[in-house]
């Protein structure tokens, strides 16, 4: 009986190991060239509130300057899309915030939302 189980295990191992393995060359090619992206803008002191600014087409480019807007596409990674940049407040962080003294609460709010002395966030979720 032990020999039968041993042979069965060896056979199952051989079957499991004999499958075709994928390699980098087996992956589908992805080309972003020719695809487009819609750009929306929100700007302080203007009527632009999530306003459609333009439609851009993906193209190969040199390394952008820090002052240039650039979108990098890595087909190996997929991310959740997001709207805007700001702080995320979880129930736990809201609870901790509520327990802080009022001066520390104000200090935290200024660190997040003050444009001169903080990081200038404009929204929280």
Image (spheres, grey):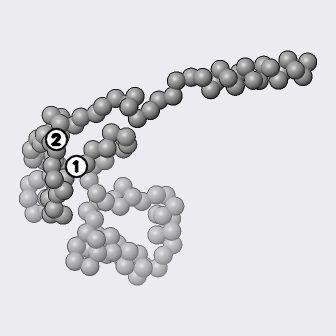
Q: In the visual, does 46 lie left or right of 71?
A: left
Dot 1 falls on a residue whose secondary structure is loop
The image position of residue 40, as x and y in percent, is: 16, 47
Q: Residue furthest right?
A: 1
**Mark carried by residue 58:** 2
The image position of residue 64, as x and y in percent, is: 17, 57
Label 2: how many Cα within 10 Å (few below 14, some 14–19, many 20+)? some
Q: Earlier in the sequence, mark 2 or mark 1?
A: 2
Dot 2 falls on a residue whose secondary structure is loop
Is residue 33 among the parts visible in the rendering?
yes
Q: Residue at x 22, y 77 (%)?
A: 116
Q: Nearer the viewer, residue 15 or 48?
A: 15
Label 1: how many Cα within 10 Å (few below 14, some 14–19, many 20+)? few
Q: Quadrant of residue 37?
A: top left
The image position of residue 96, as x and y in percent, is: 51, 68
Judging by the rendered image, the residue that carries numbered circle 1 is: 71
Quadrant for the C terminus in the image: bottom left
Q: Nearer the viewer, residue 90 or 13?
A: 13
Q: In the visual, does 85 lie left or right of 104?
A: left
């Amino acid at each position: 009986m032990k020999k039968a189980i041993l042979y069965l295990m060896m056979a199952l191992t051989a079957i499991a190991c004999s499958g075709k393995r994928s390699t980098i060359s087996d992956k589908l090619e992805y080309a972003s060239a020719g695809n487009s992206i819609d750009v929306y803008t929100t700007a302080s002191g203007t009527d632009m509130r999530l306003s459609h600014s333009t439609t851009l087409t993906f193209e190969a480019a040199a390394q952008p300057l820090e002052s240039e807007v650039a979108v990098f596409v890595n087909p190996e990674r997929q991310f959740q899309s997001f709207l805007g940049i700001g702080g995320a407040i979880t129930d736990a962080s809201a609870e901790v915030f509520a327990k802080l003294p009022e001066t520390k609460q104000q200090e935290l709010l200024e660190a997040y939302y003050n444009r001169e002395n903080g990081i200038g966030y404009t929204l929280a979720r």
